[in-house]
Amino acid sequence: MRRPIKRTTVFVLAIVVMLALFFASFMIGQYPMGPTEVVKAIGSKIFGWDFGLSEMAQTIVWKVRLPRILAALLVGATLSVAGAVYQGLFRNPMVSPDILGASSGAGFGAALAILLSFSYALIQVNAFVFGIMAVGIAYFLCQRVSQGKDALLMLVLTGTIVSTLFSSFITLTKFVADPDSKLPEITYWLMGSLATITLDDIAFLIPPLLIGFIPLFSLRWQINAMAFGDEEAQAMGLNVKRLRFLFIVTSTLLTSAAVAVSGIIGWVGLVVPHMVRFMVGPNYRDLLPMSFIVGGTFLLAVDDIARTLFTSEIPLGILTSIIGAPFFFYLLLKRKKASQ
């Protein structure tokens, strides 16, 4: 009876921390606000109460910080869930959501759209489409090469090939870009940021996230079976090939949608699932929901640091690497000690 109580306690604490950080994030920024101001701004918008707040305070809460906070929660949750699924699918703890080229494909799509002076909305759409296209190419090449044998190994290899190819395309795009205007914009986008997020971007995120999350959360026990290996999953009566395709498609949707909105933010999908395994164990029944909560909380905390540490905002991709790399090393050391 102890394990369910402990698991429930961990979930409750994680949710409490997420909600506390969600509220605190409204108060953080170049224009600091007190908790009373935040409550008044929210109450005046929802209930129509007049607290005499300035128009600037209302704008900051509802048009600047709310979209950014929601985007940080959703993008962090999305990358963490996708990373957890890929690690189980490939039975490799070093796997991240961009293993099949989704991030590099989305990066090239965005860089190409910026080079061609597309609108911001079209940049997101182009990044989303190219992210899915990159994984589609990797999967197609795997099917042609593997012929049903060593499918996971072939997926990793073809994903590496496609990722390298699209990374080269990104470099070529930067090479031909105008160094005074297009090149800085491309470079900044690739480093990842939520500075220009609006509620329209949140609306863009919701459909692919729902399409991706619903089947993954519904089939969590089957991810457990796949994590034990193809033979064990087949012995349980599962169609391994069909499930692998479904999990790759849904995880790719999640990754491409997140990258299209935020740019390339590394380490979240690699580090957070490891953190969560120490909290609730490897069972995907608990691992996926907790990855959703902790991933969103983690990226929201990083975004709060990014927009308050210095007067000029730090790209999220830089911060997640600075925080994620040593923390991941610490997790590896802890795992080694636990196994001894």
Image (cartoon, rainbow, N blue to C red):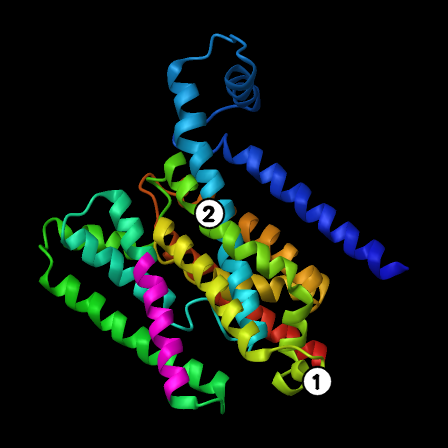
Residue identified by numbered label 1 = 235
**Residue found 45% across the figure and 43% down from its top:** 71
- Residue 307, position in %: x, y? 40, 41
Left or right, 167 with respect to 280, comes to left
Could you classify mark 1 by the number of other residues whose Cα lies within 10 Å: few (under 14), some (14-19), or many (20 or more)? few
Provide residue 203's location: percent of width, then percent of height.
Answer: 42, 40
Q: As drawn, is 5 to the left or to the right of 230? A: right
Give the residue drawn at x 63%, y 58%.
217
Q: Which mark is residue 207?
A: 2
Look at the picture and state if 193 lies above or below 21: below
**Frontmost residue, 232 versus 286:** 232
Residue type highlighted by circle 2: Pro
* Amino acid on which disc 1 is placed: Ala
Q: Main secondary structure of the magenta part?
A: helix
- Spatial distance from mark 1 to mark 2, Cα to Cα? 35 Å
Please give the range of residues in magenta.
129-144
- Location of the C terminus by quadrant is bottom right
Location of residue 22 in the rendering, given as x and y in whole percent from the top left corner:
56, 37
* Depth check, front residue: 143 or 105: 143
Mark 2 lies on a secondary structure that is helix
Q: Quadrant of the N terminus?
A: bottom right
Residue located at (50% from left, 31% from top):
26
Task: Say if the magenta span includes residue 142.
Answer: yes
Q: Is residue 9 left or right of residue 305?
A: right
Q: Earlier in the sequence, mark 1 or mark 2?
A: 2
The answer to whether residue 201 is seen in the rendering is yes
Considering only vertical position in the picture, is 255 above or below 142?
A: above
